Structure formats: structure tokens, C-alpha cells
Image (cartoon, rainbow, N blue to C red):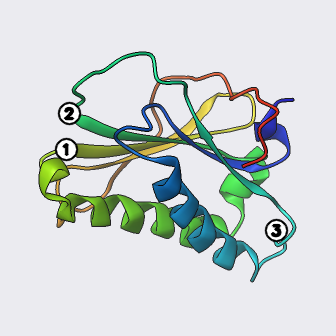
Amino acid sequence: MDVSTEALVLETPNPLDLSVDDLSELANEIQAVLDESNYSELPIKVWSEPILGAANNFLDILYVFLPNADFFRDLVWAPVAAKIVNFMRKRFSRPHEAARTRIAYIYGPDGGILSSVKLRDEFADPIWSASGPDRSPPVTTDTK
């Protein structure tokens, strides 16, 4: 099942850096926003890539798959985007992660990039871009 076509999906490429528990907290914050919109029935799923080995990453990366391109243009996107930026900003307070740049890539359900946002430090303005790598949506039967 392609989870991105029926849900908003938060994916971590490395659960040792950005855990499923961390993403579940973000999912709860986003759900509170969706509950006040016409997307209240939209499920939010958290997904993690399998751990393939140990690595030292100098970036904190989050992949966000939207259920459709209209969601990106809807008024609900602004408060959802703010939750994502605030989530990334809070991660700078962790001592072992303070120097990591944070990047969230925002995708449509087909894996085409819609936007990206980068934070270089806790106090920096978010840098929004319409570019980033395309990525295949996660395919899973997991319903986390």
C-alpha cells in the first residue's frame, strides 16, 4: 500500500538521528491543526527507513509526503508548515545535535518535490525553496 496517497506521512531516513517517537510528537501537533480544518479525518502516518548501518550525519532530514497537491495550496498548509519549522527549531537545543542543519523536504503523493525548508541554527530564519531531490513515497503496510 502506498501510504502517501491516503495520508500525510512523516518519514525519517535515519531513526537513530530523528526517532519515530520524535515524529509521533510532531504528528500529534499537526493533528491538532488538522482537527480544526476540513482535513480532520486525514490520517498522519509516521514511517522510518530500515537502519542499514551506522553513520555520522551532519544534517537532520525530515521527509513529508502530502496526500495531494491541493493540501499544499490549502490554507491549512501554513500552520502545518509552522509546526514543522518549530519542531526542527526545538531540536537545536539538544547538545549533541546543536550544530546540525535541519532540512524538511515536502513532497506530493507521487514523490515530486513541492518545497523544502532549511534551518541553519536555532535563531535563523527558515530558508524556503522550491527545489530538492525527488523521492519515492514510502510503500508499507505499517499503520503507525
Reading the image, the residue beneath label 2 is 58
Q: Indicate the quadrant containing the N terminus: top left, top right, bottom left or bottom right.
A: top right
Residue at the spot of label 1: 100
Answer with the quarter of the image where residue 28 lies: bottom right
Nearer-the-camera pick, 77 or 84: 84
Query: Which label's residue is closer to the chain start, 3 or 1?
Result: 3
Q: Seen in the image, is 133 located left or right of residue 97?
A: right
Horizontal side of residue 92 vs 17, given as left or right: left
- Amino acid type for the residue under numbered disc 2: Phe
Residues packed near mark 1 inside 10 Å, few (<14), some (14 to 19) or many (20 plus): some
Determine whether label 2 and label 1 are within 8 Å by CB.
yes
Q: Residues within 10 Å of mark 3 (few under 14, many from 20)?
A: few
Residue name at image x 79 percent, y 38 percent = 3
Q: Position of residue 70 (x, y in %)?
A: 77, 52
Look at mark 3 in the image and give the residue it sits on: 39
Number of disc labels: 3
Choose between 133 and 62: the one closer to the eye: 62
Mark 1: which amino acid? Arg
